[in-house]
């Protein structure tokens, strides 16, 4: 079957000189960078070109699918020059100006990315190195551990707190920018081509070169889903603004929409341009960039007003007509109603199938089956319509034993309307028999047996037997619930397990589920006292006891944390968050952590001036907070490196001791090696053979100064040896 085309969805088509390597919005401009080293900008609304400039006219062009170029929201552009191992950092303004040169890599840059908040940018090279820079003053902040192969891809999360970096070694690293440490390592069956965060940055979506589509849970370090969705090498990725869908481009003409909740293909259609390399969402348009220089502006909200009107009155067919006129409305937030209403629509369709009204059932679900998952659900019932019809006939004719037997061989029947009718008939008979036995168990025994006889040989056989023998137990269970004595009720359940098969038990379980939902909502709203009350109530429920106990502990820790924040108790606040990492998402804690960011910015001045002691003084009480140890260490490393560079010309340095002090804390860091090579001190480095540890600072105290002079140096400073 031919794929649908998106020609009618395209608002505008325009062209640049080469393959579109990067797209970004900066203020009112759409900025594009192509592989002819041309930077172009367009008014984001009118799409009228405002600037166009070639950074280099003679340099070798990068690969058409290169990930090396990137742009930031505040007008910065990373433009690596092939064959130079360097990249120019440029800034958009009235003119395009050069701000800095990246020169730390020992091989060409393979990938780069800017953080959404404009604070950082990162580069990854063919040398396997990843460097992270300050995007405000263009200084190196740190690097990740080197890899044994090229860096293939990198991306920051929307809140700039996480950073993902993948390599040709088929390994992906998620790095915590807040604490400056690794969050998790993911092994994949092939190279990750693109990746991005969603679900409040708790999950990572990855597309692999072999066509695989992966969803990874970062918090639990667990691969949730792996599906082979793409028939062609995926090459571009953008997450929808509401983070429910991914739009994936390929090296062919196909463009996919993936439902992130299920990791399933929702739509596939032709973009009518070969090789999609860039995808970007603005508020009005979805921009698609191709390797031939074509850029498509898709008005993905076109028809929104009409769609909203149709959905308001549940005119699904009309809504579907609007979607057919604009395929991208499929991912509009309004389309949530198609998911919310689907269970009822499916139930009604099955009812029609039971009545042999296949045409009507098909027409009813037609607006919904653009979604493959929904289509498969309906097809399942359609294919089983003989069994469904037979089952419905049994229920209608009160052949209850046969009906229940059919559910044992056709599990799907429990989801039909007929099954609900069957269960209702059983519950009526059950309650009637129970009432008879309550009134006079001896006199009414035969009447109760007769009432339950239609079900006597069914799956309810054991429950009927227990009812006739222990009728008082059922009455006792109801009395306990009426008195809200849930503890007594569950104690009775433990004695008489058959009570779990009753309708009453199902209702009590539903009460527990509702209470758990209320608990989570109250906790989220900050109503801790009421949340704790609900949690203590739920501890009585065996199936909720563990979860309720965990919530009580978390609520208590939230209280402790808020108290520590209110009293500005830095040590206690961060100790609580270290123990209960989920508390990091609390808005009060994020606001509290901003105080450290302010201190960090001040400490940078001393660090970049090569004054470790001044850096430590700037951090103050935070020096004793383990939560920030890795972040503080990253800045002190910079301070130590600048100190070494500043003091090289001041006299005879005791390199054996100085290098030992540094390497004990940071290992044989590449930045140290580069500094040593720059000053022709390789022989000094060779004499020191120890490898050290890149996180050695966790066991070695920080020192006020890293450099030790030889004793005959008049500028010898008194520094305590370790």
Image (cartoon, rainbow, N blue to C red):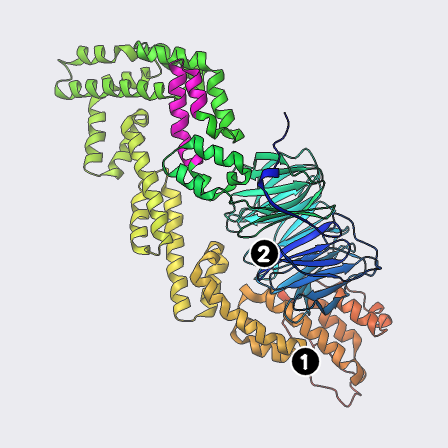
Q: Locate residue 92: give its quadrant.
A: bottom right
**Residue 462 x/y as whole percent:** 32, 17
Closer to the chain start, of discs 2 and 1, is 2
Which residue in the structure is indicated by mark 1?
A: 720
**Residue 362 x/y as whole percent:** 45, 21
Q: Nearer the viewer, residue 273 or 46?
A: 46
Q: Nearer the viewer, residue 247 or 479?
A: 247
Q: Is residue 109 visible?
A: yes
**Residue 40 x/y as whole percent:** 69, 58
Answer left or right for 216 relative to 355.
Answer: right
Q: Nearer the viewer, residue 608 or 25?
A: 25
Q: Nearer the viewer, residue 351 or 459?
A: 351
Distance between mark 2 and mark 1 Cα atoms = 60 Å
Q: Nearer the viewer, mark 2 or mark 1?
A: 2
Answer left or right for 199 relative to 718.
Answer: left
Quadrant of image for the N terminus: top right
Which residue in the structure is indicated by mark 2?
A: 44
Q: Is residue 503 above or below residue 546?
A: above
- In contact (CB < 8 Å): disc 2 and disc 1: no
Task: Give the residue drawn at x 43%, y 70%.
Answer: 569
**Residue 449 x/y as whole percent:** 22, 12
- Point out the stretch of residues depicted in magenta: 338-364
Answer left or right for 86 relative to 183.
Answer: right
């Amino acid at each position: 079957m031919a794929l649908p085309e998106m020609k009618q969805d395209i608002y505008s088509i325009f062209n640049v000189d080469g393959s579109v390597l990067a797209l970004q919005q900066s203020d009112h401009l759409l900025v594009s960078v192509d592989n002819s080293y041309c930077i172009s900008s367009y008014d984001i609304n009118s799409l009228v070109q405002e600037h166009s400039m070639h950074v280099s006219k003679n340099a070798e062009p990068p690969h058409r699918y290169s990930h090396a170029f990137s742009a930031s929201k505040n007008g910065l552009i990373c433009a690596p020059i092939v064959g130079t191992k360097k990249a120019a950092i440029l800034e958009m303004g009235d003119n395009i100006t050069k701000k800095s040169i990246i020169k730390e890599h020992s091989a060409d840059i393979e990938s780069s990315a800017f953080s959404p908040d404009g604070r950082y940018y990162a580069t990854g090279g063919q040398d396997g190195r990843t460097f992270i820079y300050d995007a405000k003053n263009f200084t190196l902040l740190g690097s990740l551990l080197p890899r044994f192969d090229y860096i293939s891809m990198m991306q920051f999360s929307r809140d700039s707190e996480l950073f993902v970096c993948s390599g040709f070694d088929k390994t992906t690293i998620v790095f915590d920018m807040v604490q400056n440490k690794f969050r998790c390592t993911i092994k994949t069956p092939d190279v990750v081509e693109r990746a991005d965060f969603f679900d409040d940055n708790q999950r990572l979506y990855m597309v692999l070169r072999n066509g695989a589509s992966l969803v990874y849970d970062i918090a639990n370090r667990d691969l949730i889903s792996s599906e082979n969705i793409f028939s062609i090498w995926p090459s571009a990725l953008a997450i929808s603004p509401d983070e429910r869908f991914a739009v994936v481009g390929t090296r062919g003409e196909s463009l996919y929409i993936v439902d992130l909740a299920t990791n399933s293909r929702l739509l596939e259609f032709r973009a009518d341009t070969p090789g999609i390399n860039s995808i970007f969402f603005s508020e009005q348009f979805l921009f698609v960039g191709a390797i031939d220089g074509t850029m498509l502006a898709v008005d993905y909200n076109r028809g929104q007003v009409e769609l909203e009107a149709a959905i308001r009155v549940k005119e699904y067919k009309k809504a579907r007509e609007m979607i057919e006129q604009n395929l991208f409305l499929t991912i509009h937030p309004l389309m949530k109603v198609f998911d919310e209403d689907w269970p009822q629509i499916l139930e009604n369709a099955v009812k029609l199938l039971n009545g042999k009204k296949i045409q009507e059932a098909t027409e009813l679900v037609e607006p919904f089956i653009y979604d493959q998952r929904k289509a498969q659900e309906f097809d399942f019932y359609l294919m089983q319509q003989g069994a469904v019809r037979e089952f419905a006939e049994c229920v209608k004719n009160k052949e209850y034993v046969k009906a229940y037997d059919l559910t044992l061989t056709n599990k799907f029947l429990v989801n039909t309307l007929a099954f609900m009718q069957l269960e209702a008939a059983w519950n009526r008979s059950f309650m009637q028999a129970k009432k008879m036995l309550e009134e006079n168990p001896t006199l009414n025994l035969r009447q109760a047996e007769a009432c339950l006889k239609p079900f006597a040989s069914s799956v309810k056989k054991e429950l009927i037997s227990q009812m006739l023998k222990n009728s008082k137990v059922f009455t006792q269970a109801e009395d306990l619930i009426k008195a809200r004595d849930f503890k007594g009720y569950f104690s009775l359940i433990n004695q008489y397990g058959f009570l779990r098969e009753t309708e009453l038990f199902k209702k009590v379980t539903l009460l527990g589920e509702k209470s758990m939902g209320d608990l989570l909502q109250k906790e989220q709203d900050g109503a801790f006292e009421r949340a704790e009350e609900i949690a203590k109530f739920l501890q009585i429920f065996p199936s909720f006891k563990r979860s309720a106990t965990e919530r009580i502990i978390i609520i208590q820790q939230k209280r402790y944390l808020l108290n520590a924040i209110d009293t500005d108790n830095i040590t206690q606040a961060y100790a609580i968050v270290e123990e209960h990492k989920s508390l990091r998402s609390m808005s009060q804690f994020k606001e509290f952590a901003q105080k450290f960011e302010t201190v960090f910015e001040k400490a940078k001045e001393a660090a970049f001036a090569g004054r470790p002691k001044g850096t430590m003084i700037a951090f103050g009480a935070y020096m004793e907070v383990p939560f920030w140890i890795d972040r503080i260490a990253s800045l002190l490393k910079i301070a130590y490196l600048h100190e070494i560079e500043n003091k090289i010309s001041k006299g005879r340095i005791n390199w054996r001791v100085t290098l030992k002090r540094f390497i004990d804390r940071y290992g044989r860091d590449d930045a140290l090696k580069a500094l040593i090579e720059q000053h022709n001190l390789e022989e000094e480095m060779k004499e020191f053979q120890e490898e050290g540890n890149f996180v050695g600072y966790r066991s070695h105290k920080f020192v006020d100064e890293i450099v030790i002079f030889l004793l005959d140096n008049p500028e010898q400073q008194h520094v305590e040896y370790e």
